[in-house]
Image (cartoon, grey):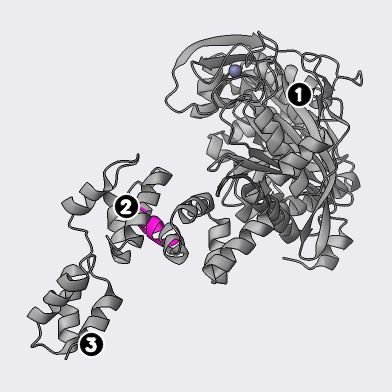
Amino acid sequence: MHDLKYYNDIGFKCGLEIHQRLSTEEKLFCSCSTDSSNDTQVGKVERRQRAVAGELGAIDRSTSFESSRGRSFVYNVFKRSSCLVDIDEEPPHQVNARAVETALRFASAFNAKLPDEIEPMRKEVVDGSDPSAFQRSMMVAYDGSIEVNGRSIPITSIFLEEESSGIVSSKGDAVVYNVDRIGIPLVEIDTDPSISTPAEAKEAALKIGTILRLTGRKEGNSVASEVQRGIGTIRQDVNVSIRGGTRVEIKGLQEIESMDVFIENEIERQLKLIEIKQNLLKKGASVDKEPTELTGLMKHERGRIIKDAVSAGAVVLGARLRGFRGSLGAEIGPDRRLGSEISDYAKMAGVKGIIHSDEDLSKYELSDETVSGVMEKLDISDSDAFIIIAAEKGACEKAMGYALERARMAMAQVPPETRAVADSKKGNTRFMRPLPGGSRMYPETDSEPIEVTESYYNEVKRHTIYMEERIRRISKELGNAQISEQLALSTRLALYEHITSEVQGINLVVAATLLEKLKELERAGIGVELHRDVFVDIFRRYSKGEITKAGIGEVIRHSPISPGDVSRIIKEHSLARISGDELKKMVDRLATGAKADVMREIMSKYRLNVDGEELSSLIGGRK
Ligand SMILES: [Zn+2]
């Protein structure tokens, strides 16, 4: 980790896009269920896609790149969670009012301004993840801010948009998606690029996530959470650039914990690529315009990898990278080299990767004769490098085209890219596609603009509970800063609020149970996601003295998921509290023993049934 001055000096800029799925029951522009668990597939649709000109006329760089890959896409359609709107065979229905309300609630939480009208737009998506080739998106607010360590970070815009579909498989040119997830409402919160260090990026992301989770809708005494929880329901894209480098978007980070590591690695990658570029320019490097066919040379190759490929009909192409020796193998991050970057580009054509001369070629079982044959044919000198690709002719040519394009970029610039997580432990990324330009939005003419009146917005705000208020309230109730903070950040805050609004005076016990006991049970492999009213029932019995604090966990362990007969559970598992006269009789029966022995004997047998404090006061008071 470096200090602020270091990041200033290298011209570090960083901005965030946080995507959070909302917890509405229906999708954004149709009535499909947002819960696809146990849904059944009822069919599939196949599409081919090609790029069309966006609003600004130019075909977007990333768009034409994707369509140049000429792939076909299959979309699996489900019973409850997909419909004709989702596959673009029917116009969108009325916008989901509840989702708009939530987005406005967030707008107020980030102190953002509202536009005169919320206008649904189509955002072009030509990576195939959307059967309609667009995603609906609308800006609901702009010009807000968050505070991080006393510094204000501008929130440039807040969007309400449709979730994309989930990829099922991708084999060569055939990609399969599920359209159950598509169209679920999500909000996107964008910061400007003024984040000044990787650590600050992480804190800003945490803050935004917390605001989204803790801003809720007041419903009687409870608070309705507005967002989905769990893996994949919040994703963060991070934009990083440095002076002399370029803007790179790291897409789909799911764990905030390692965000700073990813950013540090991206800085390092760009610095190394700049260094490689300067080296290449110094050496007067150049890249072959056209690849050379090497298939004939490989005919007698005995190494299994090439031999199998060639006998299966593959061609082998090679190209010389003049002056690149040593640069392909130069490390640019954990387990990443310029060679891996070039390989990523080639893989977009569906090939397995490239072989390059800075690698240990023996791992491809290439014989020395073959290697010298290749070097002779490509006219390789001491300072040169070469790359080889073996694949079916069409794919091989395409892959070589991409690889050589990337090699040329090494001499020109750090390419603007969207990158995906390659290894979440190492914090490194791989090339996904060129960074999209700005020409991807056009108006959604099938949907009316939404007018937000001042009185409606005020009404939304009146029914909103904000993060600050919620945290203040629980810390006042609990009187324990550490537990309050844990609870505020936990997934069970809404459950805590529900239980304590139904059963008063036992807040600390509820908090401790939800934070500690449930974790313990989960670790033991016990399902604890009971209906909230089951929890209310259990805590009410505790509050009435029917069970002890120590017994709560056991009752939870044996309770049904949906509301049922908790008293039967208590009886069956002998978990009823023993107190008052009954406990006194028990103490009297053992009256001859020393106080400590009586205590120990009773607690060893009735740990879950006896309240320690009550017992100790009974023993203490005994004559
Ligand atoms: Zn639908």
Q: Position of residue 418 (x, y in %)?
A: 74, 36
- Please report contact status of discs 3 and 2: CB closer than 8 Å, yes or no: no
Mark drawn on residue 579: none
Q: Which residue is mark 3?
A: 621
Residue 428 x %, y %: 65, 48
- The residue type indicated by label 1 comes to Gly
Q: Which residues are magenta?
A: 515-521
Q: In terms of sequence position, does the residue under pointer 1 or pointer 2 come before the other?
A: 1
Image-quadrant location for residue 378: top right
**Residue on which the image places disc 1:** 401
Residue on which disc 2 sits: 556
Nearer the observer, disc 1 or disc 3? 3
Q: Quadrant of ligand 1?
A: top right
Q: Is residue 285 left or right of residue 188?
A: right
Residue at 53% of width from left, 42% of height from top?
231
Q: Which quarter of the image is occupied by the N terminus?
A: bottom right
